[in-house]
Image (cartoon, helix red, strand yellow):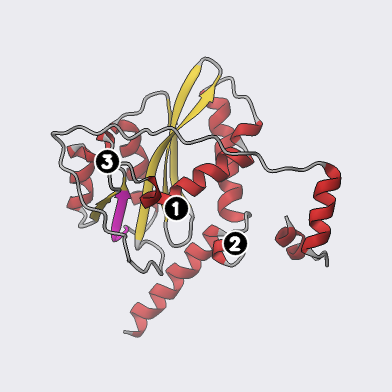
Amino acid sequence: MHQQLLEDGYKVSLNTVARYRQALGLKAVLAVKQVNTAIPIKAHKKYSYKLRGLGINHANQVWSTDITYIKIAGGMVYMAAIIDWHSKAVLSHRISNTMDSQLVMSVLNDALEKYPHPEIFNTDQGSQYTSEVHTKRLKKLGITISMDGKGRATDNICIERFWRSAKCERIYLNEYQTISELTTDVDDYIEFYNHQRFHETLKYKKPMDVYQESIKLNQKKKRAS
């Protein structure tokens, strides 16, 4: 909120913003513990975690993906998303009433069609991600597969933080009757998240700005080399 006011031309201190928030009764929404959606199949090959100690310093170096539950009237639906680790930009997302390979392949193919391919693709050990159709697609493109350690949600902390933001800032504030209604609102939130929301970890820049800046910088380096 403070950073947005500064960008809009208002000269106001962080303490002043905090006082007004308190006076207006504005409070953060507490996050609900994330339900584990990773259901492994023993017969599927698991891949090692490749991100430990890795310096992530440019866009498309690492993409990360995950699935989360969202409650609507009548039950649960599933949302899958892909995020660029460096910029925190959400590159693709889909919502479905089934948590299967079709959902994750739809998200993956959409991102691969729209953006330069990543060097590393990180997932959990869920059966959707260890399935042959998913791993084969990545390997065919020469993309290194990385998987979280069993029970180590912090290995995929980048997208876990996105889920927290999306739910606390938008999803938990509304009650959705249909998938269509939810999808429209999530689409709107991700547009805001990518292009308008400031991120402290990005030095108060916006995800898609950081993503595009990194792409341009990489292109300059390639032309110079």
Q: Are marks 3 and 2 in contact (CB under 8 Å)?
A: no
Point 84% across, 51% down: residue: 20
For residue 127, which quarter of the picture?
A: top left
Residue furthest toward the top?
74
Give the CA distance from mark 3 to mark 2.
Answer: 30 Å
Up-down relation of residue 49 to residue 204 (above or below): above
Residue that numbered label 1 is attached to: 158
Asked if the magenta segment contains residue 146, the reply would be no
Pinpoint residue 197: horizontal percent, then vertical percent: 62, 54
Q: Residue at x 62, y 58 (%)?
A: 198
Report the magenta stretch's main SS. Answer: strand
Q: For this view, does 167 lie left or right of residue 55?
A: right
Quarter of the figure with residue 117: bottom left
Q: On residue 125, which mark appears?
A: 3
Q: Which mark is residue 139?
A: none
Task: Name the foreground residue: 28 vs 103.
Answer: 28
**Disc 3 residue type?**
Gln
Q: Which residue is mark 2?
A: 200
Verify CB contact (< 8 Å) between mark 1 and mark 3.
no
Q: Quadrant of the C terminus?
A: bottom left
Numbered range of the magenta stretch: 118-122
Q: Residues within 10 Å of mark 1 (few under 14, many from 20)?
A: some
Which x, y percent locates residue 179?
A: 51, 24
- Name which of mark 3 and mark 2 comes first in the sequence: 3
Left of 195 or right of it: where is 61? left
